[in-house]
Amino acid sequence: MGVKFGPAKLIIHTRDELVKLKKEEPKSFRNQPGGPCKPYPFCRYHDTYRYMESSILDIPESGSLDFVEPCHEYKGFTNTTDETKMSKFTDEVIRFAAACMNSRTNGTIHFGIGDKPEFTHGQVLGVAVEDKEAYLNKLKYAIDGCFEYEDKQAAQMCIRPPRFVGVLNKNMTSSEKYVIEVDVVPESVICERNTYHTFNMDTKKAKKKARGREADKTETTPSEQFFVRDGGSSRNLLTTTTSAKPMEEYNQFVGSVAQRSQLRKQAEEKHLSVIKSSNQGNRLSQMITGGSLSLDKSHFECYVIVTNKSHSIQLESLGFLVELNPTVVLDFDPESAECGLQRHFEQQSTVSVHLPAQYKITEGVEDIANKLKLTRNTSWVFCNGGIKDESPSTIDEWLMDKGTPIRDVISFLCRKDVLPNKRFLVIFLLLSTVSEQMDPLVETFSTFSQELRGTEQILCICDNEKAFTSWKDLIKARCGIDISDKCIYDLNFAEVNGTILSLLSKNRRSSRFLPCGGGSQVLLEKKVERSLSTLEILCMNQCEGGNEDKIAIENFYEGGKVSLWNFYFSEQPGSTPFIKRDKFDFIMNAVIPDLCSLRKACVLFNLIHVPGCGGTTLAMHMLWALRSRYRCAVLRDSNADFAEVAKQVVKLSMYHREEQLPRAPVLLMIDDFDDMKKVNHLQKLIEKECVKKDIQFKSAQVILLNCMRSESSELTESTVNTVFIGNKLSEVEQKHFLNAETFYGFMFNKVNLNPEYIQGVVQNTLKNFNKNEKHAQLLAVLTLLNVYGNGASLSSSICHKFLGLQPTPVCGTDRVEERFGKFSTLIASREVKGKGSIQGCGNYRSKFCAVLFAGNYINSQDDNS
């Protein structure tokens, strides 16, 4: 360059000093405030959100807002020693929590966020944490010691366990620091109209007070406190002063607690009512396939992934990337090869690692593409260091250090002779929240939109609405584009993963998927399904991976138990649709939606049916029809441990959607129960388990479908939660069921039934047969006449007389068979032709087999029958 030796030596020396300074990054530089950031989502623990060092929380410390929106309090936690750190933590949490509980407001206290003059207010500092479990144990210990005995349980329920949110260095590498956060949720159902005082006392005194306040009178009386939220701090209304003003304020506040409780309850109901349903599962399927709804026949021939810092939890739900087989991945995580996405991906697929500079067009485009192996392996481009001694840059430095090579990469990829024109999709996979205008991903999006002349070939995926809002606002400010219709944000990554995997036919044959609502689904892992041993689970793709033949259908029409294969085969092209009872549409369109709208964790629906008339089949048909909307299951054993069943049902409900609303409810079918007390007991255990898991809901989470046999055929009216299925067929049903008058008539006339089926119907019908009852005695006589008297019958008048019924003025208007109660399904009236016509009772046509077995059953019970 023509620079002389002396100046050149000074330049090089200065360069070396700057590099050294950059690597050391002194404290004075670290403490300089960064850009704004959002707080970790309230009352959640499974999000992968992390703070960046020196960024500023964009919410102020505050008092009660609307009871549901959390207030915040910051603690720098910088001037504490190892000896005082734990006591400082518990003291501040108890003070803050008691204030929130009395004020009835949600709240979060943050440790490791600047609150002193030497730091910018709200600045992320982080705290070194050696033992996370110790914080959890100490907090529980402090709650037991500081709250009154009758308030301890409520405090334990309202004060959530500590959350440890990781802090990243400015260059996106991991640090060993955390922000410790504790959420407080004083739900109205827990706090009701109570007030909460706290005490300063040692453990010994706390225990004595908890056992009934029988502490030694010579001991010092603990100081009582009553905290409330006052602006950005917690204030004690029981201050030690001779003035009467504090007590007046205290009494006034206590007098307003009832009103606060009512306002809190109203705020909770309003908050749940605005939770909207989502259809983003369907949108994702449309967008990632270009409208074909199948990755086997996708409009897009290849995919380009742009991603940032990943979290270890997310890696379990990113298997879809391997299935997409991306041509290029632009990775902005400097630790990706060490412990991030690249390392995870490489274990399952073949990648070629590259630096952005290798994409610079210095020769023929085809030659460069061949060198980078774009047509064979996934080309993994490290966009912010992390490879070959390339040091990562901070957000502020990245554009100058690495911006130009990335623009070269994007320009190369968007050439018509590199990737197929209009047939590739760029997916921005936001694994970390983008919150700064200078973030590399914002610049990358801008470059892609320019090269592609729009956003038609761009899809953005993040796993929460706050991350989406931040990303959308930054793109709007940088590019002037509203990308709302290009973003998926209502789904967690497990749902994204399951939804995309299900779009490949090979996966639908080899794996099982559960619905999550809105068209999204998750992969049901085999180990999870095995753990739900009391439940037989129906998946969205049930039967699609099997090799069963039509034996299942034949067995069913011979009286065998219905199989899911019957429904599956009936839906195949050219097959006859499955015959269903009239009540099916009524239940599906009216009863189930009404039950789902109830604000109750577990609702009960009784499907009462006459034995052998298709009640269980109807219930199974409901499960089949709803398997894409609800998580459907059948209880395997009615004698199972109900407490374990309840745990497994709630586990199924919460699987891969722990903190999401609304949820697709679980539809659990129970059969062969003969006691409603057992049914109600199971319902209560499920509700109790939902409370234990602190499940929030605005609608039913579990629908208990109780399919129960009835000993009487007289119940005909349906109620809010009960529908009766009888033997008699309506006029519409008779046309579907080959003009049979009864369900039995259809079954007996259609095929030669399996004797075991007939015997089962009769045995269930004649359960608790009592020969001392007149209608039972008459049934026995009619049975013997039919079997041994060549189909003989008795006149209605004789039956009337024997049963003690009043004679009817018009023959035939009083149907004798209706007086047989639960046995009426085995009795029929007919007109006997002769010189005159008389009404007779007996059996004919379809009832012959049933009465034959009735005779055998009765004889087996009592030889004198």
Image: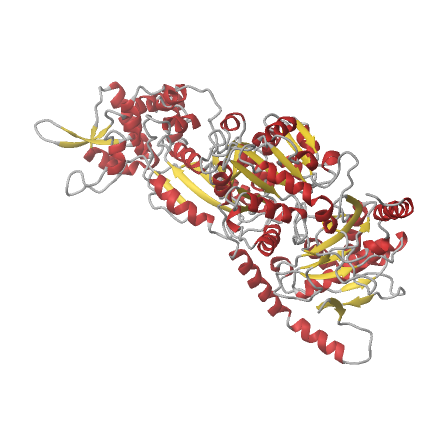
Q: Is residue 558 above or below residue 484?
A: above
Residue furthest left in the image: 835
Q: Quadrant of the C terminus?
A: top left
x and y, in percent, of residue 592 in the image = 42, 45
x and y, in percent, of residue 808 in the image = 18, 42
Q: Residue at x 46, y 26 (%)?
A: 543
Q: How many marks?
A: 0
Residue 264 relative to residue 205: left or right: left
Q: Residue at x 36, y 35 (%)?
A: 610
Residue 738: image quadrant is top left
Q: Quadrant of the N terminus?
A: top right
* Depth check, front residue: 372 or 606: 372
* Depth check, front residue: 533 or 72: 72
Q: Residue at x 80, y 56 (%)?
A: 90
Residue 104: image quadrant is bottom right
Q: Is residue 29 above or below residue 285?
A: below
Residue furthest front in the image: 2
Residue 266 relative to residue 830: left or right: right
* Depth check, front residue: 787 or 482: 482
Q: Residue at x 71, y 56 (%)?
A: 35
Query: From where the camera sits, is residue 651 visible?
Result: no
Q: Is residue 364 above or below residue 643?
A: above
Query: From where the camera sits, is residue 784 visible?
Result: yes
- The structure's colour scheme is secondary structure
x and y, in percent, of residue 119 in the image = 81, 61
* Depth check, front residue: 357 or 618: 357
Residue 123 relative to residue 80: left or right: left
x and y, in percent, of residue 391 in the image = 78, 41
